[in-house]
Image (cartoon, rainbow, N blue to C red):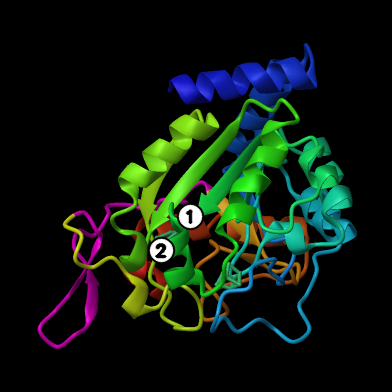
Amino acid sequence: MKRTLITAQNIWRRRGFSWPFSLLGSSVRCWNTKIPRGLVVEPSQSCTGTCAGCSRPADPAVLEPEQLDRWLTASPAKPVTIHFSGKHSDPLASPLLKDLTETAIQNSSMFSISTIGLGITPEHAKLPVDRWIFSLPAATDKSWRAIRGDGRFEEALRAIETVQKTGRRMIEVVLTLWKPSSDDREAFSRLAEERGWKYRKTVFGRFDPTGHHVGKLTNLALEDPDCPYRLDRNGKLYLKNIPRSCPLAGCLFLDAMGTLHPCPFTGNESPHLKEPSQDAWNTAKQWTEHKRNRSYPACEWCP
Ligand code: SF4
Ligand code: SF4
């Protein structure tokens, strides 16, 4: 709650006097029309990371700002929040990030970017982002190397510093626990103290059934008692506790091809929409019920 209030205070200061009114207006429009209030956007299919064994598309798609604008213009209610993130990709890999950011800022009341940080430039750090979220897979060089297979841990720490130097206050650092980094909680706390990371949290890595990325079975911290996954007697993975609802029930996901999905984890095996239109949004808002019931194939692994 305190974090939300501080975020709001910072955005108000940055966006000006009328910001609370536009926030209230867009929230009411979403509520009236039942259009989900959040939009997660994948700026590019490419990634600035170099993890060993990660298979990247040979010709990665890049989301055109015009396509993002077409979706937003067609919506009966602009999203309250727009969040740039990746699905096996990273927003910083997009050469169009500045234009995409401008489109997002003009069409939402809160705008955030979630990134692995690698490849950040001073120009990226100056973008008018309301909230930066940096995702680390490890808090020591040793566990980073075991997960990523490269030696870019210090570079990731410097990336956070690059944004800290701009004076931004809303910077959150998230440690994702994998098998090699499951003992990194203390090291993470120490780093946070030393480096002045005020907002931080720890989460567990999510299973990726494709097995091509970090989320493969062998990387899960299954021996940690708090890990949401367990293996049954036949070696099949299952969720220890099935959450009651969808953690992203209030969001939709626009991928780098410009296709709208229920969430970043559902693919073409679940409903998706390619052409922006008011009808498309009206169809998409009906997905919320299916999400709440966790009825998509990807929900099986969703903690
Ligand atoms: S595993 Fe993830 S972070 Fe690493 S290169 Fe692949 S997409 Fe990027
Ligand atoms: S996989 Fe299912 S439960 Fe998880 S965010 Fe997507 S729709 Fe929601």
**Residue drawn at 80 percent across, 50 percent down:** 121
Residue 47, percent from left and from top: 68, 68
Q: Nearer the viewer, residue 234 or 299?
A: 234
**Residue lying furthest top:** 17
- Say which mark, if any, is on residue 303: none
Q: Quadrant of the C terminus?
A: bottom left
Q: Is residue 35 left or right of residue 245?
A: right
Residue ID at (69%, 28%): 168
Query: Does the segment drawn in magenta span residue 235?
Result: yes
Examine the rendering and report whether any part of residue 294 can be seen. Answer: no
**Could you tell me residue 198's position as x and y percent?**
50, 28
The answer to which of marks 1 and 2 sits earlier in the sequence is: 2
Residue at left offset 86%, top offset 42%:
102
What's the amino acid at mark 2? Answer: Ser
Crowdedness near tag 2: few (<14), some (14–19) or many (≥20) residues, C-alpha within 10 Å:
many
- Relative placement, left or right, of 279 versus 140 is right
Image quarter in which the N terminus is found: top left
Main secondary structure of the magenta stretch: loop
Picture coordinates of residue 71, whole percent (x, y): 78, 56
Q: Quadrant of ligand 1?
A: bottom right
| Contact check, label 1 and label 2, Cβ < 8 Å | no
Residue 126 in view here: yes
Dot 1: few (<14), some (14–19), or many (≥20) neighbours within 10 Å? many
Q: Which residues are magenta?
A: 226-250
Judging by the rendered image, the residue that carries numbered circle 2 is 143
Q: Secondary structure at mark 1?
A: helix
Say what secondary structure mark 2 lies in: helix
| Above or below for 43 versus 201 | below
- Give coordinates of residue 238: x percent, y percent: 23, 72
The residue that disc 1 covers is 288
Q: Is residue 145 above or below residue 167?
A: below
